[in-house]
Image (spheres, rainbow, N blue to C red):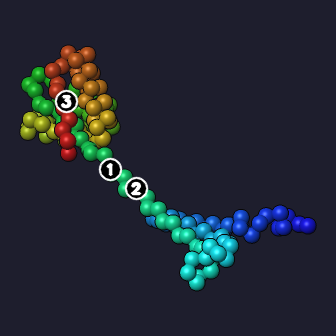
Amino acid sequence: MGLMHTVSRFEKKRVLLVAERRERIDVSMAMPPDRYDDDRGPGVAIITRTKPATKKPPLYRVLLLNDDFTPMEFVIHILQQFFNKTYDDAQVIMMHVHQNGVGECGVFTYEVAETKVTLVMDFARKHQHPLQCVMERN
């Protein structure tokens, strides 16, 4: 006898996966006649799973505060080194800080913003400048 005779008709299963936003699994299996649901014949189960909605993490603005002692070229250097700004973009942000007292360097997730603030503050202290860098929730 062939392999088909070694597998009982009750163990045969067919699984179909359809990938979209929802996952649909159609499971059909042969059932003994006494286990039929209503008059529909062998049982068919449809299981739907929705993907859990993932929330985007909150974002934080990294801000530079103006002071009267930190040279403008140092602020431009910081914006280029730690925030990957071009010289022209860094100059515009530096002038905004100088004229308005505060300027936004970028918007990041909490961990990235915290790291950038720490790096900027440590770099400023190392070079003996009183530059202040803070973060606030966007």
Q: Amino acid at mark 3?
A: Cys
Q: Residue at x 40, y 56 (%)?
A: 52
Element at badge 3?
strand
Question: Is residue 87 visible to the viewer in this orientation of the structure?
Answer: no
Residue found 18% across the figure and 32% down from its top? 134
List x then y, in percent, for residue 17: 58, 66
Amino acid type, mark 2? Pro
Q: CA distance from mark 1 to mark 3?
A: 25 Å
Q: Is residue 132 visible?
A: yes
Kind of element beneath mark 2: loop
* Closer to the eye: label 2 or 1: 2
Q: Is residue 89 above or below residue 71?
A: below
Secondary element at tag 1: loop
Foreground label between 3 and 2: 2
Q: Give the residue at mark 3.
A: 133
Residue, disc 2: 52
Evaluate if marks 1 and 3 touch, with contact meaning CB atoms under 8 Å apart.
no
Give the crowd class for mark 2: few <14, some 14-19, many >=20 residues within 10 Å.
Answer: few
Residues at marks 3 and 2, CA–CA distance in whole angstroms = 37 Å
Residue 61, image x, y percentages: 22, 41
Residue type at mark 1 is Lys
Tell which of 104 and 21 is nearer to you: 21
Name the spot of residue 94 as percent of width and height, x first: 18, 36
86 vs 35: above or below = above
Instruction: Calculate the distance from the C-alpha at mark 2 to the C-alpha at mark 1.
Output: 13 Å
Sequence order check, earlier mark of 1 and 3: 1
Judged left or right of residue 96, residue 88 is: right
